[in-house]
Image (cartoon, rainbow, N blue to C red):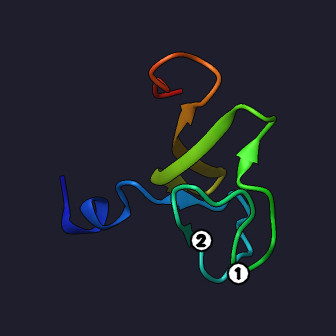
Amino acid sequence: MSLRDRETIGMTFCFNSDCLDQKNEPQAVVCAACNAPLILRDRYRAERIIGQGGFGRTILAHDIQLPGNPIA
């Protein structure tokens, strides 16, 4: 795990790709920088980007409706 990865553990990541500061506190419901919702479809809370390329990003998220909040 890289230092960058360790810095984002426990944070909530903003899904808005135009957001200037995508890191938010874990319990936040809306992004502090752009006011975008941080819970996707009332179910998924993003933690960090795990990859990106020409067609988009892959984001590590947790399913907050299932017991134990498994990775989605």
Where residue 59 appears, x then y in whole percent?
54, 46
Question: What's the residue type where badge 2 is placed?
Answer: Gln
Write the residue at 69% across / 76% down. 32
Where residue 50 appears, x then y in whole percent?
42, 49
Disc ID at residue 33: 1
Check the picture and name the quadrant holding the C terminus.
top right
Direction from residue 65 to residue 47 in the image, left or right: left
Question: Quick one: 33 or 59, which is closer to the camera?
Answer: 33
Lower position in the chain sequence, tag 2 or tag 1: 2
Question: Quick one: 8 or 50, which is closer to the camera?
Answer: 8
Question: Quick one: 61 or 51, which is closer to the camera?
Answer: 61
Question: Quick one: 4 or 58, which is closer to the camera?
Answer: 4
Q: Which residue lies most toward the front here? A: 27
Disc ID at residue 15: none
Disc ID at residue 22: 2
Which of the 4 quarters of the picture holds residue 6? bottom left
Write the residue at 49% across / 50% down. 47
Residue neighbourhood size for the residue with mark 2, other residues' Cα within 10 Å, grouped as few (<14), some (14–19), many (≥20): some
Where residue 45 appears, x then y in whole percent?
61, 43
Image: 65 above or below 14:
above
Question: What's the residue type where badge 1 is placed?
Answer: Ala
Asked if the residues shown at circle 2 and circle 1 are in contact, with their CB atoms under 8 angstroms apart, the answer is yes
Where residue 15 appears, x then y in whole percent?
69, 57
Which of the 4 quarters of the picture holds residue 8? bottom left
Q: Alpha-carbon distance for marks 2 and 1? A: 7 Å
SS for callout 1: loop
Image: 69 above or below 48:
above
Direction from residue 16 to residue 2 in the image, left or right: left
SS for callout 2: loop
